[in-house]
Image: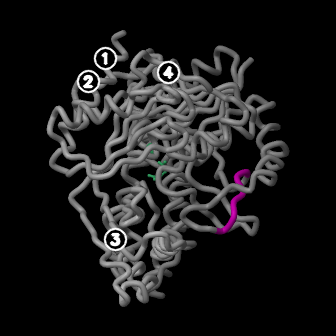
Amino acid sequence: MKTITMKFGGTSVGGPEAISNVVEIVKTEREAGNRVIVIVSAMAGVTDNLLASVNAAVSGNKWGYLSTADKLRERHEDTLNRLVPPGKLREKTFSQITHLLNEYTEICNAVTILGENTARVSDAIVAYGERLSSRVVAAALKASGVESAAYDAGEFLLTDDRHQGATPLWDETQARVENKLKPALDQGVTPIITGFIGATQKGAITTLGRGGSDYSGAIFAAATDSDELIIWTDVDGVMTTDPRVDKRARVLPYVSYQEVGELAFYGAKVLHPKTVQPVLDKGIPIWVRNTFNPTFPGTLIRENGEPTATVIKAVTSIRNVSLLTVSGKGMIGVPGIAGRTFLATANAGASILMISQSSSEQSFCFLVTDGTAENVKDSIESELGGEIARRDIEKVDIQDDVVIITAVGAGMRGTPGVAGRVFSVMGDNRINVIAIAQGASECSISFVVAESDLERAVVKLHDLALESAAV
Ligand code: ASP
Ligand code: MG
């Protein structure tokens, strides 16, 4: 008997057809004698709807959340009607939906009256997406004969109180899983647990950040010592590149934990970047599979990915980034400029995607997401005001028509010539490289090019990845 944690994303629970596939997948596993823990996202688009309604509520727009409540009711009830026959189970689930949506409207109403929103309130509101979908999925499973029960993750997953990006309290979570979740599993129940959300020790609902239900999947897989974590999504697996940029993109059969971590960080929307960490220590393999193509094996993520001959496995790109350059002759040999710049960046609430400095020390540059660049620039200029006045630093510059391209492959480590090949390809195609960085992990090379060069850079680099796969 195996224990399998399965996470189903927004499209995988997006409507009645999708949820029927979920039911089949879970049922098959149960009939094979395995224990299954199910983590669900909100139905596709619902999280965005909820966040938009909070913003409307703050500005006094009652109509926004009232119509959202109506739409959510309709969508969940329609789905339920298609999956659960008339009777007690359907009625009971209807009343759960009504109850949750009434609470939702009450909280939004309070926000409208106060004209103010906090991260804590926003978490409480956005959590209704997963709280609703979990009830519907649990009812659909019950209707098809699988004994299951819906749970709000906060019953088990305790976190700190950093709302909208909470961190799990591992020991407390483990204890709750032992005392409350494992007994349910032992009794043959298939728990349907809300992804994305947790709770503080005092019981306030928290969220793990956008896209966080993958992370929830990994947390529950680790806490239950699962044999596998399966991320069920709407694509066949982890791809060699974004198929919208290059149609030749293929599914990778194997990827290592480290490679998938780099891919997630550098723009491939396969997995939330934190997903790997909880399962890594326990060596739990992750599968990425397609709910709408369940016979396809998908991608297996584990300790050692299969190295390929020319070592570049996948190519990703990140748009909507800005390049900040701090330059000046007076920086040479002066310690602390970079440190203060990065602190100023953090104080502006931005995180850094990539850093590069040449050894002449006359300038260094780094990348942040577009929306944060102006604030970062202001923050740096005030931090380095003295140096700027003395002309030790000439300027802080923003360039926003750039993108980051990343080539990923663990086989790069210790393989000479990979960077050479990457940049020869850029040179041969007359693509100007603005900045370069390679992490010490040597699992990826990232560089910055003009936005207008994105497609060509990805396609040409993808040639290298396909070449290696063909060998
Ligand atoms: N529903 C949440 C979101 O859209 C979490 C998730 O689906 O992973 O961000
Ligand atoms: Mg996702």
Where does label 3 land, which residue?
Answer: 327
Q: Is residue 269 left or right of residue 154?
A: left
Q: Main secondary structure of the magenta part?
A: loop
Secondary element at tag 3: strand
Q: Which mark is residue 254?
A: 4
Residue 31 in the image, given as x and y percentages of width and height: 64, 16
Q: Is residue 160 magenta?
A: yes
Residue 382 in the image, given as x and y percentages of width and height: 42, 86
Question: Which badge, 4 or 3, comes first in the chain's sequence?
Answer: 4
Secondary element at tag 1: helix
What is the three-letter code of the residue carrying label 4?
Tyr
Q: CA distance from mark 3 to mark 1?
A: 40 Å
Assess whether mark 1 and mark 3 are in contact (beta carbons under 8 angstroms): no
Please identify the residue farthest to the top as the structure is shown: 471
Residue numbers of the magenta segment: 156-161
Assess whether mark 1 and mark 2 are in contact (beta carbons under 8 angstroms): yes
Assess whether mark 3 and mark 2 are in contact (beta carbons under 8 angstroms): no
Relative to 436, does residue 87 appear above or below in the rendering? above
Q: CA distance from mark 2 to mark 3?
A: 36 Å
